[in-house]
Image: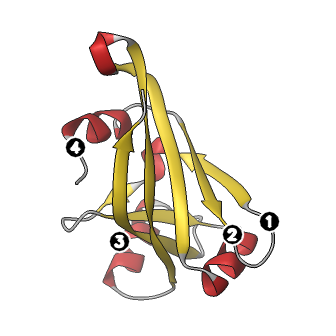
């Protein structure tokens, strides 16, 4: 589901927006492309330090949307820049081997946001 172009975007720095919503209005939090780790089964692991509102929303409604991109990766018709919208279900990890691996890479994290991808669309 995750294409080579998606992984090309992850290799470049850019902002990632994560949208969650519980019973209230949508909430957006940001991180960086370089903080996303994709597992062999295409789950996305994201280090979380704050993200408390996101966690509250995920506990009420586990659906999330993620937008990311890079102007350094060619998009459709070889135009400069491309981006993706990822949809999936989320949960927070606070222990286990994947938490430990992420903690080693990103010492600042207190939890790991795990996203199981259900849709990945290249937008530009």
Tell me the mark number nearer the camera, choosing from 3 and 4.
4
Up/down of 32 relative to 70, above or below: below
The residue at 59%/64% (across/down) is: 108
Disc 2 secondary structure class: loop
Q: Which of marks 4 and 2 is in front?
A: 2
Q: Residues within 10 Å of mark 1 (few under 14, many from 20)?
A: few
Q: In which quarter of the image is residue 36?
A: bottom left
**Callout 3: few (<14), some (14-19), or many (20+) C-alpha neighbours within 10 Å?**
few
Q: Mark 3 points at which residue?
A: 101
* Residue under numbered circle 2: 21
Q: Is residue 12 visible?
A: yes
Closer to the N terminus: mark 2 or mark 3? Answer: 2
- Label 1, on which residue? 25
For disc 2, the neighbor class at 10 Å (few under 14, some 14 to 19, many from 20) is many
- Which quadrant: the N terminus? bottom left
Residue 74 image point, x, y percent: 33, 18
The reply to whether callout 1 and callout 3 are in contact (CB within 8 Å) is no
Residue 12 in the image: x percent, y percent?
Answer: 40, 31
């Amino acid at each position: 589901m995750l294409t080579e172009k998606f992984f090309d975007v992850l290799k470049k720095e850019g902002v990632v927006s994560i949208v969650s919503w519980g019973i209230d209005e949508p909430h957006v939090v940001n991180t960086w492309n370089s903080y996303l780790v994709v597992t062999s089964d295409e789950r996305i692991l994201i280090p979380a330090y704050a993200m408390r509102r996101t966690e509250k929303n995920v506990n009420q409604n586990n659906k999330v949307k993620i937008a990311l991109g890079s102007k350094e990766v060619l998009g459709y018709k070889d135009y400069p820049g491309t981006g993706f919208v990822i949809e999936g279900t989320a949960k927070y990890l606070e222990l286990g081997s994947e938490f430990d691996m992420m903690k080693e890479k990103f010492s600042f994290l207190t939890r790991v946001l795990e996203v199981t991808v259900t849709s990945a669309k290249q937008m530009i």
